[in-house]
Amino acid sequence: FPVTITNVTNVSIFESGFDQLSLYSNPGTGLFRIQFQSPDNLPVQWTLVNSLGQDVRTELVSINGDNVQTVELDFSDFASGLYTIHLSQSVRVGHVNCMIRR
């Protein structure tokens, strides 16, 4: 049967992902380079999340005006394991897994 929804408020719509999102060298010892395409000149926030779902580091990155962004990440002070890097920019979100090995 059809369902009608009315009076919807406070809804956030997010675009799915960043174009050309990649992470080098993965797995790695803690030094990574993340690249992504950003058509907007808005800052990008990345958050490193551990395997327990805890945010362990967050940083806001200014966009330099180029279409493809490269950000150097130093996670050498974290223990070995699987982590997720979440990216967000206005309505755009994305994520990539990274493995730190010692």
Image: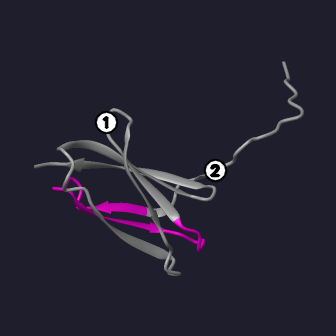
Q: Which residue is mark 2?
A: 14
Q: Where, quadrant-wise, is the N terminus in this rendering?
A: top right
Residue 99 location, x and y as percent? 23, 48
CB atoms of marks 1 and 2 within 8 Å: no
Q: Which mark is residue 25?
A: none
- Indicate whether residue 2 is drawn in magenta: no
Q: Residue furthest left?
A: 102
Residue appearing at x 25%, y 56% in the figure: 75
The image quarter in which residue 24 lies: bottom left
Where are the magenta residues, as a range?
21-43
Residue 94 falls left or right of residue 27: right
Residue 79 falls left or right of residue 51: left
Asked which secondary structure carries label 2, the reply is loop
- Indicate whether residue 26 is drawn in magenta: yes
Residue 79 location, x and y as percent? 18, 44
- The mark closer to the camera, 1 or 2, is 1
Q: Which residue is mark 1?
A: 51
Neighbours of disc 1 within 10 Å: few (<14), some (14-19), many (20+): few
Between 7 and 74, the one lying in front of the other is 74
Q: Residue furthest top?
A: 1
The image quarter in which residue 40 lies: bottom right
Residue appearing at x 19%, y 56% in the figure: 76
Residue 29 falls left or right of residue 18: left
Asked which secondary structure carries label 1, the reply is loop
Between 5 and 10, the one lying in front of the other is 10
Q: Mark 2 is on which residue type?
A: Phe
Q: Mark 1 is on which residue type?
A: Ser
User: Which of marks 2 and 1 precedes in the sequence?
Assistant: 2
The image quarter in which residue 51 lies: top left
